């Protein structure tokens, strides 16, 4: 579940096309080794995303997890965190910005 949500976040907020449904190698027109490499990269990225989320400041991490993993809306998160919905929004925006930045750096490092 965490993997899919992390991949959804990356797809939705960074323009990366992430296919998280398993498709047969024939449907994807890729040899089995390429598919395995894609799966391995997805697994590595999932682990990195989890680490990056853990490294967010505490309040950003809390707001982000409540929003993305628990499915709460800003008003509900505001109540849980005892802050205003605007503050919740600010925390989530900052968390997404940080995660996007780390993902961009990760992509640059992969390309060389």
Image (cartoon, rainbow, N blue to C red):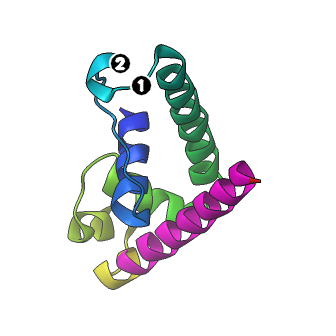
Q: Residues within 10 Å of mark 1 (few under 14, many from 20)?
A: few
Q: Residue at x 51, y 67 (%)?
A: 95
What are the residue bounds of the magenta stretch? Answer: 89-111
Q: Is residue 59 visible?
A: no
Looking at the rendered structure, the secondary structure element under dot 1 is loop
Q: Residue at x 53, y 65 (%)?
A: 100
Viewer-nearest residue: 90 or 21: 21
- What mark, if any, has residue 91 been given in the picture? none
Picture coordinates of residue 85 (x, y %)? 29, 79
Label whose residue precedes the other's in the sequence (2 or 1)? 2
Q: Residue at x 42, y 70 (%)?
A: 92
Quadrant that contains the N terminus: top left
- Residue at the right extreme? 112
Q: Are marks 2 and 1 in contact (CB under 8 Å)?
A: yes
Q: Residues within 10 Å of mark 2 (few under 14, many from 20)?
A: some
Compared to residue 94, the image places residue 15 above or below, namely: above
Let me know if residue 98 is in the magenta part: yes
On the rendered structure, is 10 left or right of 85?
A: right
On the rendered structure, is 29 left or right of 58?
A: left
Picture coordinates of residue 81 (x, y %)? 39, 66
Q: Magenta segment, principal secondary structure?
A: helix
Viewer-nearest residue: 83 or 35: 35
On the rendered structure, is 25 left or right of 60?
A: left
Identify the residue under disc 2: 25
Q: Quadrant of residue 30?
A: top left
Q: Residue at x 33, y 39 (%)?
A: 19
Looking at the rendered structure, the secondary structure element under dot 2 is helix
Picture coordinates of residue 7 (x, y %)? 41, 45
On the rendered structure, is 33 left or right of 90?
A: right
- What mark, if any, has residue 30 been given in the picture? 1
Picture coordinates of residue 56 (x, y %)? 61, 60
What whole-number distance in Å separates the C-alpha atoms at marks 2 and 1? 6 Å
């Amino acid at each position: 579940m965490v993997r899919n949500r992390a991949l959804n976040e990356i797809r939705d907020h960074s323009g990366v096309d992430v296919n998280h449904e398993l498709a047969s190698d024939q449907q994807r027109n890729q040899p089995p080794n390429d598919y395995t490499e894609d799966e391995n990269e997805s697994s590595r990225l999932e682990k990195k995303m989890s680490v990056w989320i853990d490294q967010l400041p505490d309040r950003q991490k809390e707001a982000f997890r409540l929003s993305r993993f628990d499915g709460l809306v800003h008003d509900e998160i505001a109540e849980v965190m005892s802050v205003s919905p605007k503050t919740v929004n600010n925390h989530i925006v900052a968390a997404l910005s940080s995660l996007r930045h780390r993902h961009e750096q990760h992509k640059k490092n992969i390309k060389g």
